Each structure stands twice: as C-alpha cells, then as structure tokens.
C-alpha cells in the first residue's frame, strides 16, 4: 500500500505526541499533581494511530480507561487533554472526567469509559444512527483483550453483525487484563477467530507496525462505509508499563517486558522512514522538537487554568 509522505509524517507526529503526553502525565502523577491515576498507552501508539489515520473527523471512536492515545490519535488538543487530567475547567469535560473519561466531540471521540468494553454499546448505537440517517460515517470502538470476554463485547458484535452496521471493532491485545494474562482465561490464541462466530471478517495484524495497522484499518473502514458491515480488527501489542502508573507489576517477568520494549513502535517506524522510505532525518527531528514544545505549552496551559467552581459541582448531571 503506497502512503503519501505527508501521511507518513503525520503518523510519526501523532505517535510521538502520544508518547510525550504519556510521559508528561506519568511525571505529573509521580509529583502528586494529577488527580487520580493514569493508564498509559506507551508501546501501543502504532495501534491507535494506524486506526485513526484511516478515519475522517466525522467518524466516531469510543475508548477505554487507556484512551489518552486514542484521543490524541484522533486529533484531540494536547492542552485541553492535559487540563482535563489536572481537573481544570478548561479541560475537555471541564475537569469532571479526568484521565479515564475524556470525550472530545469536535474530533470525533464519543468518550473514554473506565468500565471494560462499555464503549462498544455507544459505538454500535452510533453506527445504527448512521445507518438510519444514511450518513457516510463509521464507528470504531477500542477495547483491550480482557474486554473480549464481556457481555458488552459479544452482544455488540452480534447486533452489529445482524444489522450489518458500519462498525470496525478494534481489539488491542496487549496480553494482560490488569494482572491476568489473556492466555489464562481464553482458550484460543488468535482472538480474531472470534469474528467467525458472528459471520464477520476477523483480521489480525502486528500492532507494533503502524503501516500494517493503517492498511488493515483502511480496508475495514472502506468495507463498513460501502455497506459491507462490521469487521473485527485485532492488533497484537503490549503495554510496557504497568496497568496503571505506579503499579508493582509483580505478575510478569522483567525479561518479558524488556523483550517487548525492544519492539518500540516509534523507534521501529522512525528507522523504517529513514532506511526504507528515505525520509529526511532533519524532518523527523523537527517534529520531535515541535512535539516537545507543544507538550510544554500544554503543561503551562493546564497549570495556569482555573479550577472548577465548587458551586457548579452538580452541573452536567442528568437523571
């Protein structure tokens, strides 16, 4: 699949933005400057970026508790993201969502939800609306491997398949549901085989390879847009940090983590851009500098932003 240089550079930019944002968020947590905790997307950047680069702004995504990366990959503003993490009024959800519940409607994010796989019903509902309104739009829910063992996941795939809805279900197999390895709770190793139970295509790709993800996502999105129905896209990846910032991680071997760190999707893509696609090193360096400046600006914006007024605590609550 031939990809334009501008698209390649934007993929790199978004991956670096995610990585630098997550490092900054982790640093804030360690300093006690962030409310709650953070679940980082470090090591999984190629998955979210590869998928979201295949979407239009009006296409919708729904995320999980680990969705900083999904939002940034879809084009969310770093400053408003950082402000939300710090509980500020200028955040996407006016400081009320925090790290695990960011919704950025203008860039096509229905929102991140902390309960595993709970974004799937939202995305399926959105896809049904697209179909009923005859809108040329696609819905993409992200979930982790643990989410594939939930009722939301199975019921969502079944409904989308039965009604031929424009959905691409992205299952990011990062190998662990908190401290439980997916192999210990699921008999099949290739989770894309589950698609056969619903009569839809199942595609499995290397989640460390942004171009492989982009190619598979582009095909699945085109199929959904053309009325072909849903696809299950499994990206094989790994979360190199703990389930949450500061987690002891006593359940996995350090050698295993080191093995996967060596597969770093950003370093891998950078090398490929330089060695195989003849991209100028200076262009990539300029992007690195640009992203660092953007993160610094986002941090300054968030720190300087006002706290929500306690008198508004019950605003935006609906029964």
Image: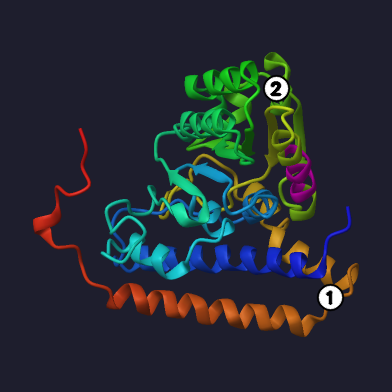
* Residue for badge 1: 279
Q: Position of residue 278 (x, y in %)?
A: 89, 74
> To which quarter of the image does residue 86 belong?
bottom left
* Residue at x 57% of width, y 22% of height: 185
> To which quarter of the image does residue 267 belong?
bottom right
Mark 2 is surrounded, within 10 Å at the Cα level, by few (under 14), some (14 to 19) or many (20 or more) other residues, namely: many
Q: Is residue 160 above or below residue 22?
A: above
* Residue at x 54% of width, y 25% of height: 153
**Regarding mark 2 in the picture, which secondary structure is present there?**
helix
**Regarding mark 1 in the picture, which secondary structure is present there?**
loop
Circles 2 and 1: CB atoms closer than 8 Å: no
Q: Earlier in the sequence, mark 2 or mark 1?
A: 2
Query: Which one is in front, 197 or 239?
Result: 197
Q: Position of residue 24 (x, y in %)?
A: 45, 69
Q: Position of residue 62 (x, y in %)?
A: 50, 41
Q: Is residue 55 above or below residue 230?
A: below
* Residue at x 62% of width, y 64% of height: 14
Q: Is residue 307 above or below residue 265?
A: below
Query: How far is the residue under mark 2 from the one under mark 1?
Result: 38 Å
Question: What predominant SS class does the magenta segment belong to?
Answer: helix
Residue 66 appearing in the image: no
* Residue for badge 2: 195
Q: Is residue 88 magenta?
A: no
Query: Which one is in front, 130 or 238?
Result: 130
State the extent of the magenta-drawn residues as a range.
213-220
Query: Which one is in front, 319 or 297?
Result: 319
């Amino acid at each position: 699949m031939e990809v334009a240089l501008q698209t390649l550079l934007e993929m790199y930019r978004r991956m670096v933005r995610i990585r630098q944002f997550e490092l900054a968020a982790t640093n804030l947590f360690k300093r006690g400057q962030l409310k709650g905790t953070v679940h980082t997307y470090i090591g999984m950047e190629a998955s979210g970026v590869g998928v979201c680069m295949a979407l239009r702004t009006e296409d919708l995504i729904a995320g999980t508790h680990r969705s900083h990366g999904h939002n940034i990959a879809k084009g969310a503003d770093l400053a408003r993201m950082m402000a939300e993490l710090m509980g500020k009024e200028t955040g996407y959800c006016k400081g009320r969502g925090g790290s695990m519940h960011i919704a950025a409607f203008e860039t096509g994010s229905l929102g991140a939800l902390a309960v595993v796989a709970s974004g799937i019903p939202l995305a399926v509902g959105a896809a049904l609306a697209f179909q009923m309104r005859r809108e040329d739009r696609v819905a993409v829910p992200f979930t982790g491997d643990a989410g594939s063992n939930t009722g939301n996941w199975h019921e969502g795939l079944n409904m989308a398949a039965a009604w031929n809805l424009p959905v691409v279900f992205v299952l990011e197999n990062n190998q662990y549901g908190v401290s439980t390895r997916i192999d210990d709770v699921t008999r099949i190793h290739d989770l894309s085989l589950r698609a056969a139970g619903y009569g839809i295509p199942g595609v499995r790709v290397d989640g460390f390879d942004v171009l492989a993800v982009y190619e598979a996502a582009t095909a699945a999105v085109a199929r959904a847009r053309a009325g072909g129905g849903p696809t299950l896209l499994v990206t094989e990846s790994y979360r190199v940090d703990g389930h949450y910032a500061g987690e002891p991680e006593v359940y996995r071997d350090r050698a295993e983590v080191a093995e996967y760190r060596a597969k770093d999707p950003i370093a891998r893509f950078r090398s490929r851009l330089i060695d195989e696609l003849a991209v100028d090193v200076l262009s990539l360096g300029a992007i690195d500098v640009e992203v660092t400046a953007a993160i610094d600006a986002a941090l300054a914006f968030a720190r300087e932003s006002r706290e929500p007024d306690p008198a508004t605590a019950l605003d935006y609550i609906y029964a």
